[in-house]
Image (cartoon, rainbow, N blue to C red):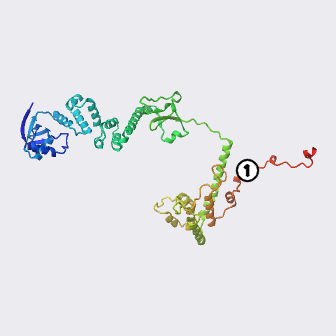
Amino acid sequence: MMNEIKMIPIGDLIHHPENPRLDLGDLDELTASIKANGILQNLTVVPDLEKCKYLVVIGNRRLEAAKAAGLVELPCSIRDMDHQEQIATMLQENMQRSDLTVYEQAKGIQMMMDLGFSRDEISERTGFSRSTIERRLAVATLPEQETKEAVECGWDLTDLVEISKIEDEKTQKRLLTDTAPGQLKQAIEVAKKDQVRERNKKRLMPEIERLKMKKLQKDSDRWSSKYEHIRSMMIHLDDDLAEIKVPAEYEGKNIYYFISWGDIEFYVAAKREKHVKSEAEIALEKKQHDAKELNDRMRERRIAFLNTFTPTKKLTAQLQENMWEWAFGWRSTYNNGGFYMTYHNWDDVLFRNMCGMPIEDGRDKEESILEEIERRGIPMGRALLCWMLCGGIKSDTRKGYASEYNGSYQKDTDMDDVYEILIAAGYEMDEEEEQWKYVTHPFFHQDSPEEDPEDEEPEDDDDGEDADDND
């Protein structure tokens, strides 16, 4: 084996292209020492026969410092090494540096493993114990850039080894970049639990598919009356031994599953017994139906008026005056800042219905409501009144004075205001409408109890004598 020592011109020495130490660090102190004392230790080199030069295996820092010190040749030990031994030697030299970070040590050990060295051989060459080598090999599996930044921020080996136990690279990156050191322990524990749950989910899903279970699409379905929870089948995803066992009473039935944060829950369609309505329920439904029918009938009358309403100039002027009073007068609603608040969430469909201008096929969608009103020739007074009642000033509610919840009378101040605006515009209420508004309609009194003769106080018997008179 070649082991010749000789002086080699500095121009014939080149850095090994696969040297793992890319950053040579500060060379000022070493340069000053070489100027004063010369080179005290030989460089280790191998011949590069193609270029007729020598590759520096050990001594790259000394080479650069010698150039800066003005030396023209250096003492070198010429070795005969194969490619694997060259890399191993450079790694071994770098591994013994005191300024190496944990991650740099980890990558160096991994490179030696890649070259075919066993753990025992690496331990013998570097002086690291087997446990140290194992821990650094774990760190070497982490994402490179994020790990470097974490090491620069002061994360220690224990932190990095714990993160290496997380299998998902995306989670590893998140822990390395987005976690404060004080929260790392808790974040790693959460990630480990998530990893166990994900692993168990993947283990159990083939069995769920084999049993042809269907997935509940919405979380709200779990709480609806449509499904019954099979509590005995519930699986905790933290449990590596959990298995899917279908109870005998549910075999052959359609079973549904839902995966929550840490569990798999199972459901079947709930049994539905036919509900027999009581007389009270039937009576209430009739009241609700009649109330809606009554409210709708009154509303149709208001819409019929608006569809044909063509105000005179005088009436339009009066309507505008009333509108300004409603919008900016004493009846307007103010917020805390003192600004007038209108509804502004007005109903376009309702407006078109009340104004008698349904949406046309092929209508220009860029056309504004105002432009459409003018094109259709709808009187501005009618459009203005409809707008006022569709959220511009007040809302022509979809209900009315008859409660569609229990069929009783309900106070409706919005409806009172709607009628005041309509009447100011010339609307006349018919008899039934007045009965509905002023609570004299038969609908509101259909349950009034009739006077029971037995409840009347008895009349005095003129022919009888008071008991006191017999004493």
Above or below: residue 416 compared with residue 45: below
Residue at 33 percent across and 42 percent down: it is: 176
Q: Residue furthest top?
A: 248
Quadrant assignment, res 140: top left
Q: From this viewpoint, is residue 240 visible?
A: yes
- Residue under label 1, please give it: 448
**Dot 1 lies on which element?**
loop
Q: Position of residue 374 (x, y in %)?
A: 51, 67
Q: Is residue 346 left or right of residue 85?
A: right
Q: Is residue 291 left or right of residue 343?
A: right
Nearer to us in this view, 155 or 121: 155
Looking at the rendered image, the quarter that the N terminus falls into is: top left
Quadrant assignment, res 141: top left
Q: From this viewpoint, is residue 379 visible?
A: no
Residue type pointed to by label 1: Ser
Nearer to us in this view, 266 or 147: 147
Q: Residue furthest front?
A: 36
Q: Is residue 78 left or right of residue 204?
A: left
Q: Residue furthest bottom?
A: 314
Nearer to us in this view, 79 or 153: 153
Q: Position of residue 267 (x, y in %)?
A: 51, 35
Residue at 68 percent across and 43 percent down: it is: 280
Above or below: residue 180 compared with residue 114: below
Residue at 20 percent across and 29 percent down: it is: 124
Q: How many marks?
A: 1
Q: Position of residue 6 (x, y in %)?
A: 6, 37
Q: Position of residue 211 (x, y in %)?
A: 46, 31
Q: Within 10 Å of the Cα at label 1, are there few (<14), some (14-19), or many (20+) other Cα atoms?
A: few
Looking at the rendered image, the quarter that the C terminus falls into is: top right
Above or below: residue 416 compared with residue 81: below
